[in-house]
Image (cartoon, rainbow, N blue to C red):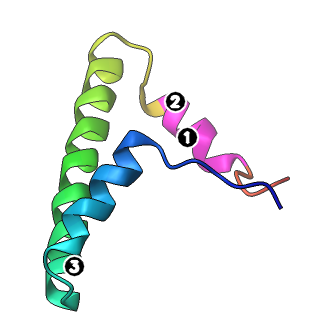
């Protein structure tokens, strides 16, 4: 098995988690990251909706797709 090198983001997160080892702290960080990336997704979706790339017809097509196929 090849050794994997950690990315700068992974290294930073490891340092961040090393300060407080409680489960509550881990959940708090997870919540913060989740909210951050959800906002980025919402902002990008809004841009796509405004410029017409994304619309109800496209959403309906996506809903019908099997996104779990390999």
Q: Are marks 1 and 2 in contact (CB under 8 Å)?
A: yes
Residue appearing at x 23%, y 78% in the figure: 26
In front here: 45 or 6? Answer: 6
Where 26 falls versus 35 (above or below)?
Answer: below
Q: Is 39 colored magenta in this rendering?
A: no
Mark 1 — residue?
60
* Residue that badge 3 annotates: 27
Residue 46 percent across, percent down from the top left: 25, 27
Q: Nearer the viewer, mark 3 or mark 1?
A: 3
Give the side of residue 26 with respect to residue 58, left or right.
left
Q: Position of residue 33 (x, y in %)?
A: 23, 56
In primary-sequence order, the first of circles 3 and 1 is 3
Q: Which residue is mark 2?
A: 57
Q: Residues within 10 Å of mark 1 (few under 14, many from 20)?
A: few
Kindly indicate whether the residue at mark 1 contacts the one at mark 3 (C-beta within 8 angstroms): no
**Mark earlier in primary sequence (3, 2):** 3
- Quote the CA–CA distance across marks 1 and 2: 5 Å
Question: How many numbered callouts?
Answer: 3
């Amino acid at each position: 098995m090849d050794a994997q090198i950690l990315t700068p983001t992974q290294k930073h997160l490891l340092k961040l988690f090393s300060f407080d080892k409680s489960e509550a702290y881990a959940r708090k960080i997870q919540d913060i990251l989740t909210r951050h990336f959800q906002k980025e997704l919402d902002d990008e979706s809004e841009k796509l909706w405004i410029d017409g790339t994304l619309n109800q017809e496209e959403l309906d097509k996506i809903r019908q797709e099997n996104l779990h196929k390999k």
